Amino acid sequence: MKDNCIFCKIANGEIPSHTLYEDEDFRVIFDLGPATKGHALILPKKHYDNIYALDDETASKAFLVAKKMAVAMEKAFAADGFNIVQNNGEPAGQTVFHFHMHLIPRYKGDNAIDFWKPGSTTDEELTILEEKVKKEL
Ligand code: 5GP
Ligand code: ZN
């Protein structure tokens, strides 16, 4: 646990929360400022600042929890769609610096999330970007 991290405290039960799901590694809670009805968060019990800090095992398990919750929440809330969102770094919208995944049920016409406007690119640019990424893998 990291000192003064609100999500460490919630994930480890130091601060009580409505818990939708819990296992050895994760707690799933409702977001206090929900984008839609049922918006929830997957919190690992161990502290990781962001996705870059995650170990492979936790990353794999997190997505299994996301799948399990999406299936259950879609049914429970009769959702028409579902977004899984995960922000890293301030420019990407991260405000709590303890890794978490957003589970956002969507309802027809909710207009709850406006992610991005499609831009444009070129084959040359994509070739350069592809090479840059491959060097880091
Ligand atoms: P981020 O912007 O970092 O991806 O998401 C942080 C989310 O945590 C926001 O959607 C915000 O509403 C939610 N949040 C912030 N503080 C608390 C809290 O104390 N309890 C809960 N349940 N959610 C919180
Ligand atoms: Zn933390």
Image: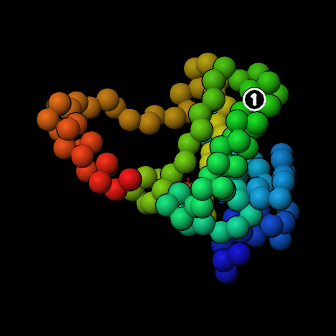
Against 96, is 116 above or below?
A: above
Relative to 125, is 15 on the left or the right? right
Q: Which quadrant holds the N terminus?
A: bottom right
- In the image, the residue with mark 1 has its CB under 8 Å from the nearest atom of ligand 1: no
Rendered image coloring scheme:
rainbow
Q: Tag 1, which secondary structure?
A: helix
Q: Position of residue 61 (x, y in %)?
A: 70, 49
Asked whether the viewer can see residue 124, the reply is yes
Q: Residue 37 occupies which quadrant of the picture?
A: top right
**Which residue occupies 67% across, 81% down?**
3
**Which residue occupies 20% across, 38% down?**
127
Q: Residue 23 occupies which quadrant of the picture?
A: bottom right
Against 80, is 31 above or below?
A: below
Q: Give the residue type at disc 1.
A: Val
Q: Position of residue 114 (x, y in %)?
A: 46, 34
**Which residue occupies 31% across, 48% down?**
134
Asked whether the viewer can see residue 37, the reply is no
Looking at the image, the residue that sits furthest to the bottom is 3
Question: Which sits in the foreground, 4 or 59?
Answer: 59
**Which residue position holds label 1?**
71
How many numbered marks are there?
1
Q: Where is residue 113 in the image (x, y as percent from the top left)?
A: 51, 35
Relative to 74, is 130 on the left or the right? left
Q: How crowded is mark 1: few (under 14 residues within 10 Å), some or many (20 or more)?
A: few
Against 20, is 89 above or below?
A: below
Q: Where is residue 55 in the image (x, y as percent from the top left)?
A: 60, 61
